[in-house]
């Protein structure tokens, strides 16, 4: 999830689990606890872009980090807020607030290194877009209400419950959409006789009704979109060859090895002018629902590496205008 959503969720959970021992400051502690795992953004100041991709949501989002940081933060809160000596409740507050971002972040397509440093496997359920306003609005409204209401207002309990409950219900709704979409996509692939040994579905930007689909193998990938409101099971796929042979000139490159590991094999290679471009297909296309052959959001220049400062969301909204939004809404409504 985006940082503001984490802060709002943390404030709601701080109110829920810590108000009896920390008072209104529990919201601040909850927001802080939710934000600390994202301290890994600092790695960008000394790591190369490819290495930073693997560091983000790595160790600071691991279960080991959660176990290590929880008692430290609980003891710090204990020292700052004596005589409220209810340590177990503080430990539960911080454990929940730290674990929650690991749990929520695993539902979008970037993935989370839950088992770092023992395993580099990234957990990713591909069920919700990283910045979905329909998920964020509930804890956001609750957080605003909790800031406005005084400490002893009886409605405070209803507001944190509202924020957490509706966010949870929406996440459950997303999981249902994910399950139904996977069934429909597998049916479409079978009907269209498309061979594949790996595939995924993930929501298109800012909602959970239109899903981005990638299916293929080491030769290339079929890319398309499926709406939960589609009346037909056919999907209009666009084929992208993988072009591994283009990598012969950079075999053994350290950045390339990191990119392949990060992409989970969902990548293609293209030649743009005088540079090779590595595309990670998991992050979607730039307005792909309107331009099926469009460029991929994640594209990494293997020669001109100074141009790789923003990689994951490069050009995400670069072509968005009124016509693009209308095309998105039309495609969401179904074929």
Image: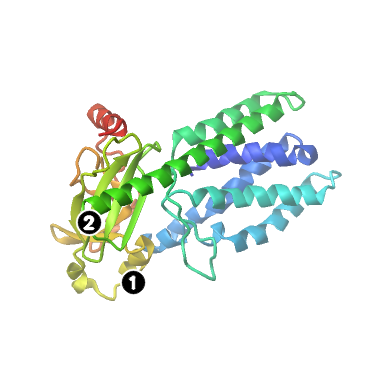
Helix, strand or loop at mark 1: helix
Query: Residue 88 location, x and y as percent?
Result: 79, 51
Q: Residue drawn at (24%, 44%), measured in percent from left and top?
A: 235
Q: In this rendering, does residue 234 appear at all?
A: yes
Q: Is residue 134 above or below residue 67?
A: above
Q: Residue drawn at (18%, 61%), measured in percent from left and top?
A: 275
Kindly report which numbered mark, 2 or 1, lies closer to the viewer in this rendering.
2
Q: Earlier in the sequence, mark 2 or mark 1?
A: 2
Q: CA distance from mark 2 to mark 1?
A: 33 Å
Q: Residue drawn at (72%, 24%), measured in percent from left and top?
A: 150
Count of marks overlaid on the render: 2
Q: How is the protein colored in the picture?
A: rainbow
Residue 254: give its label.
Answer: 1
Q: Is residue 108 above or below residue 269?
A: above
Q: Is residue 245 above or below residue 182?
A: below
Residue 297: give its label.
Answer: none
Q: Which residue is mark 2?
A: 194
Q: Quadrant of residue 265?
A: bottom left
The quadrant the C terminus occupies is top left
Query: Residue 153 location, x and y as percent?
Result: 74, 23
């Amino acid at each position: 999830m985006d940082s503001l959503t984490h802060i709002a969720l943390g404030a709601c959970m701080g109110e829920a689990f810590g108000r009896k021992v920390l008072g209104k400051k529990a919201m601040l502690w909850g927001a802080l606890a939710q934000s600390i795992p994202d301290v890994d953004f600092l790695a960008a100041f000394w790591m190369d872009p490819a290495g930073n991709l693997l560091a983000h949501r790595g160790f600071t989002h691991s279960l080991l980090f959660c176990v290590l940081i929880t008692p430290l933060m609980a003891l710090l809160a204990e020292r700052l807020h004596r005589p409220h000596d209810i340590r177990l409740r503080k430990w539960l507050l911080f454990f929940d607030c730290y674990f929650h971002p690991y749990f929520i972040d695993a539902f979008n397509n970037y993935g989370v290194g839950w088992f770092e440093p023992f395993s580099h496997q990234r957990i990713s359920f591909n069920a919700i877009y990283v910045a979905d306003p329909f998920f964020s609005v509930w804890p956001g409204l609750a957080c605003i209400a909790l800031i406005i209401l005084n400490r002893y207002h009886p409605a405070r309990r209803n507001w944190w419950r509202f924020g957490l409950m509706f966010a949870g219900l929406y996440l459950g709704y997303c999981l249902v959409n994910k399950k139904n979409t996977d069934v429909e996509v597998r049916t479409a692939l079978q009907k269209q006789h498309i061979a594949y040994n790996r595939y995924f579905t993930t929501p298109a930007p800012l909602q959970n009704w239109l899903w981005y689909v990638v299916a293929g193998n080491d030769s290339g990938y079929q890319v398309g979109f499926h709406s939960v409101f589609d009346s037909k099971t056919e999907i209009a796929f666009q084929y992208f060859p993988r072009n591994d042979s283009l990598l012969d000139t950079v075999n053994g490159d350290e950045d390339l090895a990191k990119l392949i590991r990060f992409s989970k094999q969902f990548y293609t290679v293209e030649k743009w002018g005088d540079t090779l471009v590595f595309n990670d297909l998991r992050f979607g296309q730039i307005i792909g629902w309107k331009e099926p052959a469009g460029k991929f959001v994640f594209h990494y220049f293997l020669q001109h590496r100074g141009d790789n400062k923003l990689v994951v969301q490069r050009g995400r909204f670069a072509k968005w205008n009124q016509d693009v939004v209308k095309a998105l809404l039309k495609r969401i409504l179904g074929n």
